[in-house]
Image (cartoon, grey):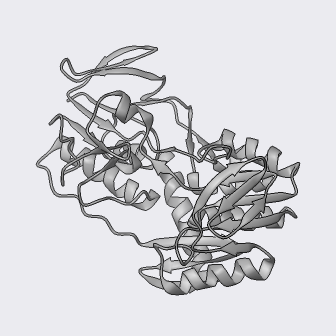
Amino acid sequence: MRTIIIGGGFAGLSAMKVNKSLLIDEKDYFTLTHKLVDVFKIGNPNLAKIPYREGNFLRARVREIDFRRNKVITEMGAFDYDKLLIAAGYSQKIFPNTLKIENIDDALNLRQRVMKSKKVTILGGGLLGVELASACKEMGKEVSLVEGQNKLLGFMTKESSQFALNKLSEIGVKVLLNQKVEGIENGKVKTNDYELESDVVISSVGFRGPSLVQEMGLTNVNGRMLVDDYLRSVDYENVYGAGDSATTKGFVPMSAQVAVQAGKTAMENMLREPRKFTYKQVAIIVKINGEYFGDLMGRFVRGKVAEMAEKIGIAKAVMLVN
């Protein structure tokens, strides 16, 4: 059976562990997305970059997918498939007049801009926004963090949310909760209650599926291809989706751990009798000012236990590539 995987992120490489397929990616390296903040803070792209091993990897941009003839058409030629897995990661839709941190180039560009600035405003109090706020403060900047909800890290435990708020406040980050952004122009961020002068505005929200999904005309939710409980496309029975590229009607979180599980299940379902996809979010770890904390099996942890959970997660990611 000819199987093709589009995208070499957590889901795509997890699928490759099940069955060696032709993997097509625009980059020649795997990105540790949860290390992008470290790239931003330190300026070393290798912190988040792991080169792909030679073999079934093809570096190319996908121009078209002919679903009727079962062909993936790239700038390097056309390739036939019997089963196709789309695991092309995510993209980020940002507010006007803001910067993003979607990939390594973004992280390096953002570092240059922030290094020249004094006042930084970050939109979004999720995991990325919280870690960016800490990193900017460690770089000696005046930092404001704007969140629309009444707490930070809204998807995590109350203990993690409160700990993040306390730690950021402790290091001098101005945390503004229950704030809706009403406009960004002329170096000012306007919310329902504040007007913040800003040299740089960073958007840590707006994550959605990759542009490829909509460009290929696939049924989608917020740019993520819609799949059934077996991770099979609702449009084509021999096309599957996994990771941040896909979601079910019941919703699948955009998470590295979930992507690894989805990639494995998707490839197994492509090869044999399918089984329904279920996922488990084992650990979500955050770092503020060098201190690790987060949720492990649904319980708040900090210090050495949290740091060990983070290192285990990185080690597993590296194993996907090697």
Residue toward you, 20 or 13: 13
With 311 as the anchor, is 248 left or right in this view?
left
Q: Residue at x 68, y 84 (%)?
A: 166
* Residue that protrudes farthest toward the left in the picture: 273
Residue 169 in view, yes or no: yes
Say which quarter of the image contains residue 67: top left
Q: Position of residue 66 (x, y in %)?
A: 26, 19
Q: Position of residue 151 (x, y in %)?
A: 55, 78
Q: Position of residue 92 (x, y in %)?
A: 53, 45
Residue 47 in view, yes or no: no
Q: Residue at x 77, y 46 (%)?
A: 186
The image shows residue 174, relative to residue 93, as above or below, that is below
Q: Position of residue 218 (x, y in %)?
A: 27, 34
Q: Residue at x 42, y 61 (%)?
A: 257
Say which quarter of the image contains residue 125: bottom right
With 138 as the anchor, is 158 left or right in this view?
left
Q: Quadrant of the N terminus?
A: top left
The image shows residue 164, relative to residue 185, as above or below, that is below
The image shows residue 131, relative to residue 321, as above or below, that is below
Q: Report how many numbered discs are placed on residues in the image.
A: 0
The image shows residue 221, relative to residue 179, as above or below, that is above
Q: Residue at x 59, y 62 (%)?
A: 124
